[in-house]
Amino acid sequence: MPFGLFLSVRKPRVVSNTPNTRMVAPSMKPLSLQSPLRPALGRLRGALAGLSMVALFSAPALAQDARPDQVFVIDRRSGGVIAASGTVMANELDEVRLTGRDGDEQKFKSDRVRGVTFGGVPASYREGMLLRERDDFLNAAAKFKLAAADPDARDVVRASARLRAAEALLLLGAVDSSAFADADTAATRFIEEHATNRELPQARFIQARARLATGDFASAAELFRSLYREGTGVAITPGYDPLFCTTAGLRGADAYLMAGDTLAAREIYQALEAKLPGVIAALEEDDNTRSQWVAAQADARLGEGFALLTAGSTGQAKAFFDSQVTNAESPAALRFGVTLGKGLVNLAEGKYRQAQFDLASVSSIDHTDRNRAARALIGLAQSSLNLPDTGARQQGKVWLRSVLDHYSETIWVVRAQELLKGF
Protein backbone atom coordinates (compact mmCIF):
# COMPACT_ATOMS: atom_id res chain seq x y z
CA MET A 1 0.00 0.00 0.00
CA PRO A 2 1.22 3.56 -0.57
CA PHE A 3 3.21 4.70 2.41
CA GLY A 4 5.13 7.90 3.17
CA LEU A 5 8.56 6.50 3.85
CA PHE A 6 10.69 9.58 4.27
CA LEU A 7 10.42 13.07 5.63
CA SER A 8 12.30 15.43 3.39
CA VAL A 9 15.15 17.34 5.03
CA ARG A 10 15.54 20.73 3.42
CA LYS A 11 17.81 23.64 4.13
CA PRO A 12 15.77 26.23 6.06
CA ARG A 13 14.77 29.22 4.00
CA VAL A 14 15.55 32.51 5.71
CA VAL A 15 12.76 35.03 5.36
CA SER A 16 13.50 38.62 6.25
CA ASN A 17 11.03 41.40 7.00
CA THR A 18 13.59 44.16 6.47
CA PRO A 19 15.05 45.59 3.27
CA ASN A 20 18.43 44.45 2.02
CA THR A 21 20.10 47.73 3.15
CA ARG A 22 22.24 47.10 6.21
CA MET A 23 20.95 49.06 9.23
CA VAL A 24 23.24 50.14 12.12
CA ALA A 25 21.99 51.77 15.32
CA PRO A 26 23.33 55.32 15.82
CA SER A 27 25.06 54.45 19.08
CA MET A 28 26.68 51.35 17.62
CA LYS A 29 29.58 51.00 15.26
CA PRO A 30 30.05 48.07 12.94
CA LEU A 31 32.56 45.62 14.36
CA SER A 32 35.92 45.75 12.67
CA LEU A 33 37.18 42.60 11.01
CA GLN A 34 40.24 43.01 13.23
CA SER A 35 38.15 43.35 16.39
CA PRO A 36 39.36 41.26 19.35
CA LEU A 37 35.79 39.96 19.62
CA ARG A 38 36.10 38.19 16.27
CA PRO A 39 37.46 34.86 17.63
CA ALA A 40 34.68 34.73 20.22
CA LEU A 41 32.08 35.50 17.58
CA GLY A 42 33.55 32.81 15.40
CA ARG A 43 33.24 30.30 18.21
CA LEU A 44 29.69 31.48 18.88
CA ARG A 45 28.76 31.10 15.23
CA GLY A 46 30.29 27.63 15.22
CA ALA A 47 28.32 26.64 18.29
CA LEU A 48 25.10 28.00 16.82
CA ALA A 49 25.79 26.19 13.55
CA GLY A 50 26.33 22.98 15.47
CA LEU A 51 23.05 23.45 17.30
CA SER A 52 21.33 24.15 13.99
CA MET A 53 22.66 20.93 12.51
CA VAL A 54 21.50 18.97 15.56
CA ALA A 55 18.07 20.52 15.26
CA LEU A 56 18.00 19.88 11.53
CA PHE A 57 18.79 16.20 11.82
CA SER A 58 16.62 15.74 14.90
CA ALA A 59 13.60 17.14 13.10
CA PRO A 60 12.83 14.02 11.09
CA ALA A 61 12.88 11.81 14.19
CA LEU A 62 10.54 14.16 16.02
CA ALA A 63 8.27 14.38 13.00
CA GLN A 64 8.18 10.61 12.65
CA ASP A 65 7.07 10.24 16.25
CA ALA A 66 4.36 12.83 15.73
CA ARG A 67 3.14 11.59 12.37
CA PRO A 68 -0.46 10.38 12.80
CA ASP A 69 -1.88 7.02 11.85
CA GLN A 70 -4.58 6.92 9.19
CA VAL A 71 -7.65 4.71 9.12
CA PHE A 72 -9.40 4.39 5.76
CA VAL A 73 -13.10 3.76 6.21
CA ILE A 74 -16.24 3.61 4.09
CA ASP A 75 -18.27 6.75 4.60
CA ARG A 76 -21.86 5.88 5.53
CA ARG A 77 -23.34 8.75 3.52
CA SER A 78 -21.37 8.75 0.27
CA GLY A 79 -20.20 5.15 0.20
CA GLY A 80 -16.71 6.39 -0.67
CA VAL A 81 -13.53 5.81 1.31
CA ILE A 82 -12.37 8.58 3.63
CA ALA A 83 -9.34 8.87 5.90
CA ALA A 84 -9.43 9.57 9.63
CA SER A 85 -6.19 10.63 11.36
CA GLY A 86 -4.98 10.14 14.90
CA THR A 87 -3.43 7.35 16.96
CA VAL A 88 -4.72 3.81 16.59
CA MET A 89 -5.33 2.47 20.07
CA ALA A 90 -6.86 -0.85 18.98
CA ASN A 91 -6.95 -2.69 15.64
CA GLU A 92 -9.34 -5.51 16.43
CA LEU A 93 -11.56 -7.95 14.58
CA ASP A 94 -14.70 -6.16 15.72
CA GLU A 95 -13.57 -2.52 15.59
CA VAL A 96 -10.74 -0.04 15.20
CA ARG A 97 -10.36 2.65 17.86
CA LEU A 98 -8.66 5.90 16.98
CA THR A 99 -7.78 8.79 19.28
CA GLY A 100 -7.54 12.19 17.59
CA ARG A 101 -5.16 15.02 18.49
CA ASP A 102 -7.91 16.61 20.53
CA GLY A 103 -8.21 13.47 22.63
CA ASP A 104 -11.57 12.43 21.21
CA GLU A 105 -11.96 8.73 20.46
CA GLN A 106 -13.53 7.40 17.29
CA LYS A 107 -14.69 3.83 16.79
CA PHE A 108 -15.10 2.16 13.41
CA LYS A 109 -16.68 -1.23 12.85
CA SER A 110 -14.16 -3.50 11.16
CA ASP A 111 -16.42 -4.16 8.18
CA ARG A 112 -16.16 -0.46 7.31
CA VAL A 113 -12.36 -0.34 7.57
CA ARG A 114 -10.52 -0.73 4.29
CA GLY A 115 -7.00 -0.23 5.58
CA VAL A 116 -4.77 1.25 8.28
CA THR A 117 -1.50 3.11 7.71
CA PHE A 118 0.66 3.51 10.79
CA GLY A 119 2.57 6.77 11.08
CA GLY A 120 4.54 6.36 14.31
CA VAL A 121 6.61 3.31 13.44
CA PRO A 122 10.23 2.19 13.98
CA ALA A 123 12.72 3.05 11.24
CA SER A 124 13.02 -0.67 10.51
CA TYR A 125 9.31 -0.78 9.60
CA ARG A 126 9.65 2.11 7.14
CA GLU A 127 12.78 0.55 5.65
CA GLY A 128 10.92 -2.74 5.27
CA MET A 129 8.15 -1.02 3.35
CA LEU A 130 10.66 0.60 1.01
CA LEU A 131 12.49 -2.68 0.41
CA ARG A 132 9.22 -4.46 -0.30
CA GLU A 133 8.37 -1.83 -2.91
CA ARG A 134 11.71 -2.68 -4.54
CA ASP A 135 10.85 -6.41 -4.47
CA ASP A 136 13.75 -7.04 -2.09
CA PHE A 137 11.69 -9.47 -0.06
CA LEU A 138 14.62 -11.05 1.80
CA ASN A 139 15.80 -7.81 3.38
CA ALA A 140 12.25 -6.51 3.75
CA ALA A 141 11.36 -9.54 5.86
CA ALA A 142 14.44 -9.01 8.02
CA LYS A 143 13.49 -5.38 8.66
CA PHE A 144 9.90 -6.27 9.49
CA LYS A 145 11.10 -8.91 11.94
CA LEU A 146 13.19 -6.24 13.70
CA ALA A 147 10.16 -3.98 13.91
CA ALA A 148 8.01 -6.82 15.23
CA ALA A 149 10.49 -7.34 18.07
CA ASP A 150 11.01 -3.63 18.87
CA PRO A 151 10.00 -3.11 22.53
CA ASP A 152 9.43 0.60 21.93
CA ALA A 153 6.86 0.01 19.18
CA ARG A 154 3.15 -0.13 19.90
CA ASP A 155 1.51 -3.54 19.97
CA VAL A 156 -0.60 -2.72 16.89
CA VAL A 157 2.57 -1.78 14.99
CA ARG A 158 4.43 -4.93 16.08
CA ALA A 159 1.48 -7.01 14.90
CA SER A 160 1.47 -5.26 11.53
CA ALA A 161 5.23 -5.78 11.18
CA ARG A 162 4.88 -9.50 11.94
CA LEU A 163 2.27 -9.92 9.22
CA ARG A 164 4.29 -7.84 6.73
CA ALA A 165 7.24 -10.19 7.40
CA ALA A 166 5.05 -13.22 6.63
CA GLU A 167 3.86 -11.61 3.39
CA ALA A 168 7.42 -10.81 2.30
CA LEU A 169 8.60 -14.35 3.06
CA LEU A 170 5.70 -15.82 1.10
CA LEU A 171 6.73 -13.79 -1.96
CA LEU A 172 10.39 -14.64 -1.39
CA GLY A 173 9.46 -18.31 -1.65
CA ALA A 174 9.13 -17.98 -5.41
CA VAL A 175 12.92 -17.61 -5.64
CA ASP A 176 13.90 -19.48 -2.46
CA SER A 177 11.47 -22.26 -1.61
CA SER A 178 12.89 -22.56 1.93
CA ALA A 179 11.23 -19.22 2.71
CA PHE A 180 7.79 -20.84 2.58
CA ALA A 181 8.41 -22.60 5.88
CA ASP A 182 9.55 -19.30 7.39
CA ALA A 183 6.37 -17.63 6.09
CA ASP A 184 4.32 -20.37 7.76
CA THR A 185 6.20 -19.79 11.03
CA ALA A 186 5.72 -16.01 10.88
CA ALA A 187 2.01 -16.29 10.12
CA THR A 188 1.53 -18.89 12.86
CA ARG A 189 3.27 -16.65 15.36
CA PHE A 190 0.99 -13.76 14.40
CA ILE A 191 -2.05 -15.99 14.93
CA GLU A 192 -0.80 -17.05 18.36
CA GLU A 193 0.25 -13.60 19.57
CA HIS A 194 -2.43 -11.41 18.00
CA ALA A 195 -5.53 -13.61 18.08
CA THR A 196 -8.00 -10.71 17.99
CA ASN A 197 -6.19 -8.46 15.52
CA ARG A 198 -8.19 -7.19 12.53
CA GLU A 199 -5.68 -8.79 10.13
CA LEU A 200 -6.06 -12.27 11.61
CA PRO A 201 -8.01 -13.56 8.56
CA GLN A 202 -5.17 -12.46 6.27
CA ALA A 203 -2.62 -14.17 8.52
CA ARG A 204 -4.62 -17.40 8.39
CA PHE A 205 -4.78 -17.20 4.59
CA ILE A 206 -0.99 -16.72 4.41
CA GLN A 207 -0.48 -19.66 6.76
CA ALA A 208 -2.59 -21.90 4.53
CA ARG A 209 -0.92 -20.62 1.38
CA ALA A 210 2.55 -21.21 2.84
CA ARG A 211 1.59 -24.69 4.03
CA LEU A 212 0.40 -25.55 0.51
CA ALA A 213 3.66 -24.25 -0.98
CA THR A 214 5.66 -26.59 1.25
CA GLY A 215 3.74 -29.47 -0.31
CA ASP A 216 1.50 -30.22 2.65
CA PHE A 217 -1.67 -30.07 0.55
CA ALA A 218 -3.98 -31.80 3.03
CA SER A 219 -3.05 -29.48 5.90
CA ALA A 220 -3.35 -26.42 3.66
CA ALA A 221 -6.78 -27.54 2.48
CA GLU A 222 -8.01 -27.89 6.06
CA LEU A 223 -6.69 -24.44 6.96
CA PHE A 224 -8.38 -22.88 3.94
CA ARG A 225 -11.66 -24.65 4.73
CA SER A 226 -11.54 -23.52 8.35
CA LEU A 227 -11.17 -19.93 7.20
CA TYR A 228 -13.94 -20.43 4.65
CA ARG A 229 -16.37 -21.49 7.35
CA GLU A 230 -15.81 -18.30 9.39
CA GLY A 231 -17.55 -16.17 6.77
CA THR A 232 -20.03 -18.47 5.04
CA GLY A 233 -21.97 -20.07 7.88
CA VAL A 234 -25.32 -19.06 9.32
CA ALA A 235 -23.55 -16.77 11.82
CA ILE A 236 -20.59 -14.92 10.29
CA THR A 237 -17.68 -14.44 12.68
CA PRO A 238 -17.08 -10.70 13.31
CA GLY A 239 -14.15 -9.41 11.29
CA TYR A 240 -14.38 -12.07 8.58
CA ASP A 241 -15.43 -10.76 5.18
CA PRO A 242 -17.75 -13.27 3.41
CA LEU A 243 -16.18 -12.67 -0.01
CA PHE A 244 -12.67 -13.16 1.38
CA CYS A 245 -13.78 -16.37 3.09
CA THR A 246 -15.45 -17.60 -0.10
CA THR A 247 -12.15 -17.12 -1.94
CA ALA A 248 -10.43 -19.10 0.81
CA GLY A 249 -12.96 -21.88 0.26
CA LEU A 250 -12.20 -22.04 -3.45
CA ARG A 251 -8.47 -22.17 -2.73
CA GLY A 252 -9.19 -24.92 -0.24
CA ALA A 253 -11.00 -26.90 -2.95
CA ASP A 254 -7.94 -26.45 -5.19
CA ALA A 255 -5.74 -27.74 -2.38
CA TYR A 256 -7.99 -30.77 -1.86
CA LEU A 257 -7.69 -31.56 -5.58
CA MET A 258 -3.90 -31.28 -5.30
CA ALA A 259 -4.10 -33.77 -2.44
CA GLY A 260 -6.30 -36.04 -4.55
CA ASP A 261 -9.34 -35.63 -2.27
CA THR A 262 -12.07 -34.98 -4.83
CA LEU A 263 -14.88 -35.67 -2.36
CA ALA A 264 -13.90 -32.82 -0.02
CA ALA A 265 -13.37 -30.47 -2.98
CA ARG A 266 -16.82 -31.33 -4.35
CA GLU A 267 -18.42 -30.54 -0.99
CA ILE A 268 -17.12 -26.99 -1.17
CA TYR A 269 -18.00 -26.51 -4.84
CA GLN A 270 -21.55 -27.81 -4.36
CA ALA A 271 -22.18 -25.76 -1.22
CA LEU A 272 -21.04 -22.56 -2.94
CA GLU A 273 -22.92 -23.32 -6.15
CA ALA A 274 -26.11 -23.59 -4.11
CA LYS A 275 -25.46 -20.53 -1.95
CA LEU A 276 -23.98 -17.89 -4.29
CA PRO A 277 -27.00 -17.21 -6.55
CA GLY A 278 -28.89 -15.94 -3.51
CA VAL A 279 -25.93 -13.85 -2.35
CA ILE A 280 -25.58 -12.22 -5.76
CA ALA A 281 -29.33 -11.60 -6.08
CA ALA A 282 -29.27 -9.72 -2.76
CA LEU A 283 -26.53 -7.30 -3.88
CA GLU A 284 -27.29 -3.74 -4.86
CA GLU A 285 -26.95 -3.07 -8.58
CA ASP A 286 -23.99 -0.74 -8.04
CA ASP A 287 -22.20 -2.99 -5.53
CA ASN A 288 -18.53 -2.92 -6.51
CA THR A 289 -18.00 -6.52 -5.33
CA ARG A 290 -20.56 -7.96 -7.73
CA SER A 291 -18.00 -9.00 -10.38
CA GLN A 292 -15.95 -10.84 -7.75
CA TRP A 293 -18.98 -12.72 -6.48
CA VAL A 294 -19.91 -13.66 -10.06
CA ALA A 295 -16.36 -14.91 -10.63
CA ALA A 296 -16.57 -17.03 -7.47
CA GLN A 297 -19.88 -18.45 -8.70
CA ALA A 298 -18.24 -19.44 -12.00
CA ASP A 299 -15.41 -21.22 -10.16
CA ALA A 300 -17.89 -23.14 -8.01
CA ARG A 301 -19.98 -24.09 -11.05
CA LEU A 302 -16.95 -25.44 -12.95
CA GLY A 303 -15.45 -27.23 -9.96
CA GLU A 304 -17.05 -30.53 -10.92
CA GLY A 305 -15.16 -30.57 -14.21
CA PHE A 306 -11.79 -30.11 -12.51
CA ALA A 307 -12.68 -32.75 -9.92
CA LEU A 308 -13.40 -35.20 -12.77
CA LEU A 309 -10.03 -34.38 -14.34
CA THR A 310 -8.26 -34.98 -11.03
CA ALA A 311 -10.04 -38.33 -10.67
CA GLY A 312 -8.79 -39.36 -14.12
CA SER A 313 -12.27 -39.31 -15.66
CA THR A 314 -11.10 -37.39 -18.71
CA GLY A 315 -14.03 -38.35 -20.93
CA GLN A 316 -16.55 -37.19 -18.36
CA ALA A 317 -14.60 -34.00 -17.78
CA LYS A 318 -14.64 -33.32 -21.53
CA ALA A 319 -18.40 -33.85 -21.67
CA PHE A 320 -18.85 -31.55 -18.68
CA PHE A 321 -16.90 -28.64 -20.15
CA ASP A 322 -18.47 -29.13 -23.58
CA SER A 323 -21.90 -28.85 -21.95
CA GLN A 324 -21.11 -25.39 -20.56
CA VAL A 325 -22.73 -22.97 -23.00
CA THR A 326 -20.97 -19.62 -23.08
CA ASN A 327 -21.15 -16.59 -25.32
CA ALA A 328 -20.05 -12.96 -25.35
CA GLU A 329 -22.67 -12.16 -22.72
CA SER A 330 -21.40 -14.81 -20.30
CA PRO A 331 -19.28 -13.70 -17.32
CA ALA A 332 -15.61 -13.53 -18.27
CA ALA A 333 -14.65 -15.81 -15.40
CA LEU A 334 -16.98 -18.51 -16.74
CA ARG A 335 -15.69 -18.22 -20.30
CA PHE A 336 -12.04 -18.37 -19.26
CA GLY A 337 -12.75 -21.16 -16.79
CA VAL A 338 -14.35 -23.30 -19.51
CA THR A 339 -11.44 -22.63 -21.86
CA LEU A 340 -8.97 -23.62 -19.16
CA GLY A 341 -10.91 -26.83 -18.54
CA LYS A 342 -10.95 -27.72 -22.22
CA GLY A 343 -7.24 -27.00 -22.48
CA LEU A 344 -6.45 -29.29 -19.57
CA VAL A 345 -8.67 -32.00 -21.06
CA ASN A 346 -6.74 -31.76 -24.35
CA LEU A 347 -3.50 -31.94 -22.40
CA ALA A 348 -4.69 -35.09 -20.60
CA GLU A 349 -5.73 -36.64 -23.94
CA GLY A 350 -2.34 -35.91 -25.51
CA LYS A 351 -3.68 -33.24 -27.90
CA TYR A 352 -0.81 -30.90 -27.10
CA ARG A 353 -1.24 -28.42 -29.99
CA GLN A 354 -4.89 -27.83 -29.21
CA ALA A 355 -4.10 -27.66 -25.52
CA GLN A 356 -1.58 -24.89 -26.17
CA PHE A 357 -4.10 -22.91 -28.18
CA ASP A 358 -6.69 -23.05 -25.39
CA LEU A 359 -4.26 -22.44 -22.56
CA ALA A 360 -2.48 -19.57 -24.32
CA SER A 361 -5.76 -17.72 -24.70
CA VAL A 362 -6.31 -17.98 -20.94
CA SER A 363 -2.79 -17.04 -19.85
CA SER A 364 -2.60 -14.05 -22.17
CA ILE A 365 -5.99 -12.39 -21.76
CA ASP A 366 -7.70 -13.67 -18.60
CA HIS A 367 -7.95 -10.63 -16.36
CA THR A 368 -10.34 -12.13 -13.83
CA ASP A 369 -8.18 -14.57 -11.84
CA ARG A 370 -4.41 -14.65 -11.54
CA ASN A 371 -4.53 -18.18 -10.14
CA ARG A 372 -6.25 -19.35 -13.33
CA ALA A 373 -3.70 -17.57 -15.53
CA ALA A 374 -0.85 -19.18 -13.59
CA ARG A 375 -2.44 -22.60 -13.96
CA ALA A 376 -2.74 -22.04 -17.71
CA LEU A 377 0.97 -21.18 -17.92
CA ILE A 378 1.83 -24.43 -16.18
CA GLY A 379 -0.36 -26.32 -18.65
CA LEU A 380 1.46 -24.60 -21.53
CA ALA A 381 4.79 -25.71 -20.10
CA GLN A 382 3.56 -29.29 -19.74
CA SER A 383 2.36 -29.25 -23.37
CA SER A 384 5.75 -27.99 -24.56
CA LEU A 385 7.55 -30.81 -22.79
CA ASN A 386 5.63 -33.25 -24.98
CA LEU A 387 6.24 -31.52 -28.33
CA PRO A 388 9.21 -32.29 -30.62
CA ASP A 389 9.56 -28.64 -31.72
CA THR A 390 13.00 -27.04 -31.59
CA GLY A 391 13.14 -24.83 -28.54
CA ALA A 392 9.90 -26.23 -27.09
CA ARG A 393 11.62 -27.35 -23.92
CA GLN A 394 13.23 -23.96 -23.43
CA GLN A 395 9.90 -22.25 -24.02
CA GLY A 396 8.32 -24.45 -21.39
CA LYS A 397 10.96 -23.32 -18.94
CA VAL A 398 10.20 -19.69 -19.77
CA TRP A 399 6.51 -20.21 -18.98
CA LEU A 400 7.32 -21.83 -15.66
CA ARG A 401 9.70 -19.01 -14.78
CA SER A 402 6.92 -16.58 -15.63
CA VAL A 403 4.75 -18.15 -12.92
CA LEU A 404 7.51 -17.59 -10.36
CA ASP A 405 8.36 -14.09 -11.55
CA HIS A 406 4.90 -12.67 -12.17
CA TYR A 407 2.44 -14.85 -10.23
CA SER A 408 4.41 -15.44 -7.05
CA GLU A 409 1.34 -14.80 -4.87
CA THR A 410 -0.66 -17.65 -6.43
CA ILE A 411 -1.04 -21.20 -5.17
CA TRP A 412 0.51 -22.60 -8.37
CA VAL A 413 4.06 -21.54 -7.53
CA VAL A 414 4.75 -24.89 -5.88
CA ARG A 415 3.76 -26.79 -9.04
CA ALA A 416 5.95 -24.56 -11.22
CA GLN A 417 8.90 -25.19 -8.90
CA GLU A 418 8.34 -28.94 -9.04
CA LEU A 419 8.29 -28.97 -12.86
CA LEU A 420 11.39 -26.79 -13.10
CA LYS A 421 13.36 -29.45 -11.27
CA GLY A 422 12.95 -31.64 -14.35
CA PHE A 423 14.76 -29.21 -16.66
Image (tube, rainbow, N blue to C red):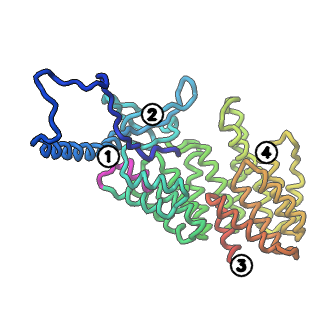
Q: Residue furthest bottom?
A: 422
Q: Dividing the image into 4 quarters, which one contains the C terminus?
A: bottom right
Q: Secondary structure at mark 3?
A: loop
Q: Give the residue at mark 3.
A: 422
Badge 4: residue crowd in 10 Å (few <14, some 14–19, many ≥20): many
| Residue that badge 2 annotates | 108
Query: Which amino acid is tagged 4?
Result: Ala
Q: How far apart in space, not on screen, are marks 4 and 1 (Cα)? A: 50 Å
Residue pictured at 52% horizontal, 57% vertical: 167
Dot 2: what SS? strand
Snapshot quadrant of residue 322:
bottom right
Query: N-terminal of the two: label 4 or label 2?
Result: 2
User: Marks 2 and 1: which is nearer the front?
Assistant: 1
The residue closer to the viewer here, 300 or 206, is: 206
Density class for disc 3 (Cα within 10 Å; few <14, some 14-19, many ≥20) is: few
Left or right relative to 338: residue 132 = left
Span highlighted in magenta in the image: 151-163
Circle 4 sits on which residue? 332
Magenta includes 50?
no
Q: Position of residue 326 (x, y in %)?
A: 87, 46
Q: Nearer the viewer, mark 3 or mark 2?
A: 3
Are discs 1 and 3 less than 8 Å apart at CB?
no
Q: Which residue is mark 1?
A: 61
Q: CA distance from mark 4 to mark 3?
A: 34 Å
